[in-house]
Image (tube, grey):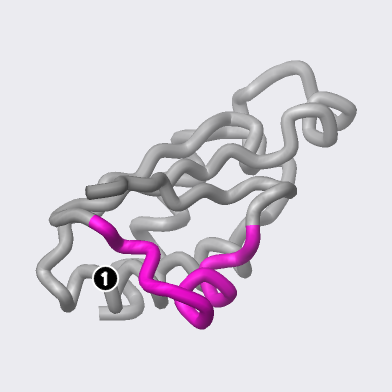
């Protein structure tokens, strides 16, 4: 069985496009990688201690699709890179807040 990571960066389609074209869930779990644009964000900062790019809109879309995946009984593991918004812990905190508000 093929497994794939759901990923967020400048070279990958948005989750809505994946789910419209095919079922990207191919196992009893999935994982998400919020990677961002390494070169783009490194032009804005060289320290990784605060949010540089507001990713609320992108994470709201992820919350929508993660809820659909979770309703299917699929475990979700999500990881954030500092290059996504400038500070990975802030990305996780933002996602959790959006997730909890959607319930």
In terms of depth relative to the viewer, which is nearer, 31 or 52?
31
Q: Position of residue 84 (x, y in %)?
A: 62, 40
Quarter-wise, where is residue 99 in the image? Answer: bottom left
Left or right of residue 58, residue 88 in this image: left
Residue at x 20% of width, y 69% of height: 70
On whether residue 18 falls in the magenta region, the answer is yes
Residue at x 58% of width, y 30% of height: 82
Q: Position of residue 73 (x, y in %)?
A: 10, 69
Pointer 1 local density, CA inside 10 Å: few below 14, some 14–19, many at least 20: some
Which residue does the numbered mark 1 point to in the structure image? 69
Quarter-wise, where is residue 92 in the image? Answer: top left
In terms of depth relative to the viewer, which is nearer, 36 or 4?
4
* 12 versus 79 height, above or below: below
Instruction: Tell me the quarter of the image containing the C terminus.
Output: bottom left
Q: Please provide the residue range marked out in magenta.
A: 13-26
Q: Position of residue 49 (x, y in %)?
A: 61, 25
Quarter-wise, where is residue 16 in the image? Answer: bottom right
On whether residue 27 falls in the magenta region, the answer is no
Q: How many marks?
A: 1
Q: Position of residue 39 (x, y in %)?
A: 82, 28
- For numbered disc 1, what is the local secondary structure? helix
């Amino acid at each position: 069985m093929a497994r794939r990571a759901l990923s967020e960066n400048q070279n990958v389609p948005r989750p809505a496009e994946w789910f419209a074209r095919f079922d990207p869930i191919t196992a009893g779990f999935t994982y998400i990688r919020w990677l961002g644009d390494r070169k783009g964000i490194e032009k804005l900062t060289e320290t990784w201690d605060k949010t540089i790019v507001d990713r609320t809109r992108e994470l709201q879309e992820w919350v929508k699709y993660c809820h659909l995946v979770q309703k299917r009984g699929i475990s979700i593991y999500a990881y954030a890179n500092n290059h996504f918004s400038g500070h990975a812990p802030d990305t996780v905190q933002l996602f959790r807040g959006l997730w909890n508000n959607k319930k």
